[in-house]
Image (spheres, rainbow, N blue to C red):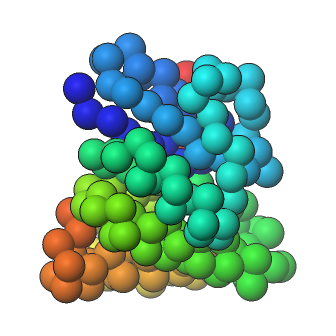
Amino acid sequence: MPRILVTGGAGYIGSHTTHHLLRLGHDVQVVDDLSHGYAHNVPEDRLHVLNLLDTAVLDALLKHFAFDAVVHFAAFIAVGESVRQPEMYFRNNCGATFSLLDSMARANVRKIVFSSTAAVYGTPESTPITEDLPHKPVNPYGQTKLMVEQAMRWMDEGNGLRFVALRYFNACGA
C-alpha cells in the first residue's frame, strides 16, 4: 500500500481523511503544527508536530519515510481573518506550501492532492459553479489558494509534479 503524508491531518477534514486512509490499509503519517488541529484526532505514533516552514525537519521526514504522495490540508481558512491579516495568510498558505513543494522535490515525491477552495471563483457569474468559470477571488484566502494552484500547474509542466486540486465549499458533518 502507498505511504502517504497528510499535512494538516489533525484538523477536521485532514483527520477524517487520515482515518479513512488508515482503514484502507495505507501507511499514513501526519504533519500538523496544532495551531488549528488537535493531537487527539490522530494516532499518537503517526503525528509529527511540525510547521511546514521548518524545511530542515520537513526534508528529514520526507526522506526518512519515502512517501509516495502527499495530501495537503494545512492552511488557514477563515475568510474574515484573511482580510484583516493578509500577510499571515500569504506566509502560511503560500509560503508553507512552497516549502512543502520544495521538500517534496528534494525527496522525489511527485504526487500531491491539494485542498483548495471554491473561493477561487469569488462571486460566481452563474450557478451551478463549473470548473471553467473564471477565477476571481474576492479575499486573500481565495487568492492564496489560487496562487498555489497556479504554481503547481507550472511545476507540473516544469518538473513533473502531479497534482489535483479539490475545490469545495464549507465542509461540515462527519
Q: How many marks?
A: 0
Q: Position of residue 34 (x, y in %)?
A: 76, 45
Pinpoint residue 162: horizontal percent, then vertical percent: 21, 63
Can residue 11 be spotted in the picture?
no
Left-right relation of 24 to 13: left
Q: Residue at x 45, y 82 (%)?
A: 147
Whole-percent x and y of residue 11? 65, 39
Q: Is residue 68 above or below residue 156?
A: above
Location of residue 9 with respect to 104 vertically, above or below:
above
Q: Nearer the viewer, residue 61 or 42?
A: 61
Along the line of sight, which residue is nearer the eye, 18 or 102?
A: 102
Q: Is residue 129 left or right of residue 87?
A: left
Question: Which part of the image, by quadrant, shows the C terminus?
Answer: top right
Which of the two residues, 5 or 77, is positioned nearer the viewer here? 5
In this view, the residue in front, 26 or 54, is: 54
Q: Residue at x 28, y 62 (%)?
A: 108
Which of the image's four quarters has the N terminus?
A: top left
Residue at the far right in the pictured view: 84
**Does the rendering let one see residue 88?**
yes
Q: Which residue is pictured at 57% across the width and 29% down the height?
A: 46
Q: Residue at x 49, y 76 (%)?
A: 98
Q: Is residue 162 above or below residue 73?
A: below
State the image quarter where residue 93 is shown.
Answer: bottom right
